[in-house]
Amino acid sequence: MLNKMLLPHIRFSYMFLVLAACFGLLYALQLLGIGTDLIRPDLMRSLHISLMLYGFVPLMMTLLPFALFDKEGILHAGSLRNLERFLWLWYIFLVFMILSILAGVTRGLPFYDFAYELNAILALAGLFYIAALIQNVRNYPKVPRWVKVSLFLVIISPLALLILMNPQYGQVEKMLQGPHGDNTLGMSFALVVIYYLVIKLSSEKISFETKWHFLWQIPLAGYAVSVLCRIFVGTLSYNAEWFFQYLTLLYVPLLYRWWKDAGLSIAKNRLLFISIAAFLFADVEGNILFIPSLRHLFHRNDLVVGHAHVAVGIGLLFLALAIIKPYMSVGRYKAYFWALMLSLMAVVLSISGIEQAGFADMHTEKLWECRALFGALFLAGLLYRPTGIGTDYLRRWVHTWNTITLYNAAGFLSDGVGGVLLLLFGKALYDMAGIPFAPGYQQIVFGFVAAVGAIHLMGVLYPRYGEASARATVLARIVTAAGFFALYKNGTFGWIGAFICMTDLLFVLVYLIFIKKEPSYEKNDMD
């Protein structure tokens, strides 16, 4: 039941991971002077980081409690409806986030670089997530401790999200001011909770009891004190942040203890092992980099970027993969290849950081070229499928298409692919055509075009809804054609407005004249 519901969402969410890798590769190329006119480099970087932090990885993490409920046999079928509502709201958030960043709406932050108001969508999604969890928790004869703790954290998370992300009194804006060791402590604690649950999911033991609770209780108390000090007292001194940062070292023996208590092994749990190893490496390295003399040399250079690739690219990504392993496993060699490419990116970035700090004399540009190469190989690894969809499969699939499917396929190629290309490379294409380009406004228009293409794609992937998808796009195209005709006539758009108007009108006429099923006008029994 859960497997059938999750597989389409896992595959759909995977698209955001591919997008994050694409934006990361494009940004790496921009550092080499390639494609700097496509999208502003700062926006490209923001898209890459935001999709890594809010795309595939966190979406898969939200599935964790339900995988545990399924494992323990108490999954409530009705909760899946609320879970789907939660996932769709998250997708809506991602679309808003991508389009707003493309339009240049950012906060100038190293992370969470999108409009604060979008957190309201996530908070609303969280309400459905809480409802889904409560429906399952009621099935427990006796609610376990991990469920009580997790449910409490989830219940307070929508409000905590709105407070911590607030520009005036939240924690996030302070990342520009100080070393933010207490923020690291808070984020690490949230991950440790998830690691505990993933270890529990991966363990073959029926009863998994943990020990050494003080190793997570002390950091939690430290983070609570730091937040209260930030809100009611003011900024923290460097030594205070240093103290809170060093509390994260308690997670090293804690995760080792949990791994042993759960009876896990590297051979059977390689994805989780890679994730924990990367997390602990980033934890230790982060504490070393917090030493004042070292932080002064390395802060905001490429070594810190490499550190983030280990923490997020390897640690969080492989943690997400470990969560979905019961439903969609990643091949051993593919997992090793991904980890290798991400590790090599981190290595060359770290070497570049050492060079930038003045400890070596090397060519930074050559190291950036290596980074782009490894990024391209990582993206190729994400897209590569040794089995499944091949040319023979595609040929057989296309042969099953009817007229309405072909119409939707043409619409997807026209609006879906075209809209995405315009979103990414609109400025460069407009410059080539000699047309003035307005970044914010026109990218929103391109987003609408891509959305029409997405409706066509649904008609291709789900043929039984092909007619409904086509009719929906006809209505959208009529409005679009009329709108672009008006914009063309009043001079807002040049010939491109007339071209879009004629293209949409052509699709409408083809559907109405050649494809639309004629209704039956036979007399009924009452005549």
Image (cartoon, rainbow, N blue to C red):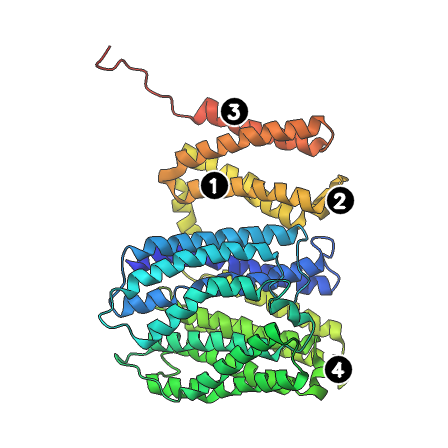
Label 2 residue SS: helix
Q: Is residue 277 visible?
A: no
Q: Position of residue 317 (x, y in %)?
A: 49, 70
Placement of 162 over or under 303, stated as above or below: above
**Relative height, residue 437 to residue 483 (above, below):** below
Front residue of 285/163: it is 163
Q: Residues within 10 Å of mark 4 (few under 14, many from 20)?
A: some
Q: Which residue is mark 1?
A: 455
Q: Amino acid at mark 1?
A: Ile
**Which residue position is annotated with label 4?**
357
Q: Amino acid at mark 2?
A: Asp
Mark 2 vs mark 3, CA separation in Å = 31 Å
Residue 431, which numbered label? Answer: 2
Q: Position of residue 208 (x, y in %)?
A: 30, 81
* Nearer-N-terminus badge (2/3): 2
Callout 3: helix, strand or loop?
helix
State how far apart marks 2 and 1 are (Cα): 29 Å
Q: What is the three-letter code of the residue carrying label 4?
A: Ala
Label 3 is placed on what type of residue? Leu
Q: Quadrant of residue 450?
A: top right
Between 194 and 363, the one nearer to me in the picture: 194
Give the residue at x 67% y 82%.
237
Disc 3 and disc 4: Cα gap in Å?
63 Å
Q: Nearer the viewer, residue 190 or 480?
A: 190
What residue is pinned by disc 3?
509
Mark 1 or mark 3, whichever is nearer to me: 1
The tag earlier along the polypeptide, 2 or 1, is: 2
Decide which of tag 3 and tag 4 comes sooner along the chain: 4
